[in-house]
Image: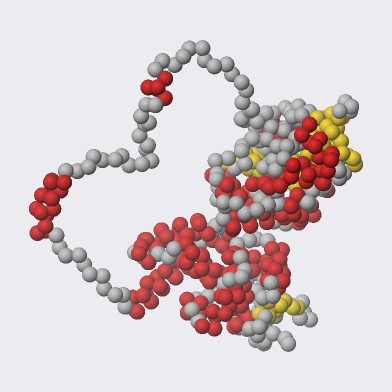
Amino acid sequence: MTVAIEMGQTLAGAAAAMDLEELLATRLLVQGNSGSGKSHLLRRLLEQSAPWVQQAIIDPEGDFITLAEHFGHLVIEAEDHTERGLQVAGERARLHRVSTVLNLEGLDAENQMRRAAAFLGGLFDVPRDHWYPMLVVVDEAQLFAPAVAGEVSDEARKLSLGAMTNLMCRGRKRGLAGIIATQRLAKLAKNVAAEASNFLMGRTFLDIDMARAADLLGMERRQAESFRELERGQFMALGPALSRRPLRLHIGPTDTSPRNSTPRLMPMPEAALEDARAVILAAPPPDASRPQRRPAPDLLEQLRAAKAAAPEISPEPIELPVSAEALAERRERVDRTLRAVLAEPDAGFRAIGVLYQEFVVRCRIEGLGAAVPDLNEFRRMITHARAGLGTELAEDDAWQEVSLRASILPDDMQGVFMMIARAAKEGWPCPGDAAIARAYGSHSLRRAQRLLTYMEEQGLIVCQLDGGGRRFVTLVELAWATAPGDPNADDLPVEPAPSAAPA
């Protein structure tokens, strides 16, 4: 059965329908400058398709939370949850087929990117049995898949861009139909925009955006000027789910409205404000977040108080150098505290920032306040700990070459590489996919397989299978090789294998 959802009318007055099944098999890109009716188009599409298919909306401004009242969408306030919590929420929403709105309002740009990436990752990584059809709408997509680096960290940009690329490039096989909307095509990453097969182009004024829109619709450059003439709510449509040729249509009305509607003109108040200067320029109220400024103390009184207290002041203690035994004991206490943090349930799947906060608290309880490592050192310790490396092995000269090679990988992959390198150095069986995924902080076995493929593409390792289907890994140039191991094994090997890897 073909399901056609009505988006509005063409200029000739005919109904403009969208083939929902065809949309699920492809992807949609919506473009329009601010005020073109882009959000109204998305709302119409979501309302018309809500009875037929599960939906997830990435909402940076909180515009779509009103869908919950009419269609039962679950609103998730992103600022109330950690990245790990949102990843699990995405998985559970997919498993139970619950339509959701991820409200990112109130977060800065970097946290919006991180939390959106975590939620999309949860939708993407569910088992194959739960790959139900689903519309994933991302408003203001240029925020989550920027064409160039901005003010956010490289890590946040890579996470968000990777999640958006997965949605648009690999989501179709998992039942995810990406619908992305943007104000500026020039600011949207090309590899994300290029995956769309359906297009709805609204009013655009900048030459570079009009040129890209014309290219996507297969129009001549001289026809690009027509995008300036579009009225609010009018869009040029093209694609297998819409029309085989560029078609101008007008989006129909919606049953719900955004929480923050467009400001309208209002008459100025008739009565003038009495003494406007005194009201507007009055002293601001005290800022509760800042301590109140105290009046400067009397200098003479300070001198008298210091002189009276001088006989009671004892000389400052001299800080003695710390012995090697004390340093070793302090290091052991720090390592013990780290092991206690990692022994907590789901510690391998929690964000680094959350783990670090718990680590700092435990260190203070142990009386290690002055010896608490900073966040960068903690990341290094976590990488070594997840790889099963002790302090002695991590500081071994022979291991420095491994650390150098691991540095070319992203931070979250270095622990996995070191874990494999340790197994190769000791001649242990190659870790299974479950152990690799756990060290990476994921439940996905496919992601573990992709990690090995990526490391092999970087020229760091060579993966092979023996006659029994067991996997062994050789480190390039180091002549270290793991013993054959079952890829489906769940536990990380802790004892040497009885024989070496095959030649």
Q: Nearer the viewer, residue 242 or 224?
A: 224
Looking at the picture, how far across and down is residue 488, in whole percent? 70, 70
Q: Name the side, left or right, on which 267 lies relative to 392.
A: right
Give the colouring mode of the picture: secondary structure
Q: Quadrant of residue 75?
A: top right
Decide if residue 349 is in sight here. Answer: yes
The N terminus lies in quadrant: top right
Q: Name the side, left or right, on which 402 lies relative to 481.
A: left
Outermost residue toward the front?
A: 222
Q: Residue at x 67, y 76 (%)?
A: 460
Q: Residue at x 70, y 37 (%)?
A: 33
Q: Nearer the viewer, residue 450 or 89?
A: 450
Q: How many marks?
A: 0
Looking at the picture, how far across and down is residue 266, in whole percent? 59, 18
The C terminus lies in quadrant: bottom right
Decide if residue 120 is in sight here. Answer: no
Q: Residue at x 15, y 63 (%)?
A: 314
Q: Residue at x 66, y 50 (%)?
A: 146
User: Would you place residue 84 above or below residue 298 in this image?
Assistant: below
Outermost residue toward the top?
A: 270
Looking at the picture, how far across and down is residue 77, in whole percent? 58, 41
User: Would you place residue 444 above or below residue 430 in this image?
Assistant: above
Q: Nearer the viewer, residue 501 or 254?
A: 254
Looking at the picture, how far across and down is residue 263, in whole percent? 61, 26
User: Would you place residue 52 above or below residue 447 in this image?
Assistant: above
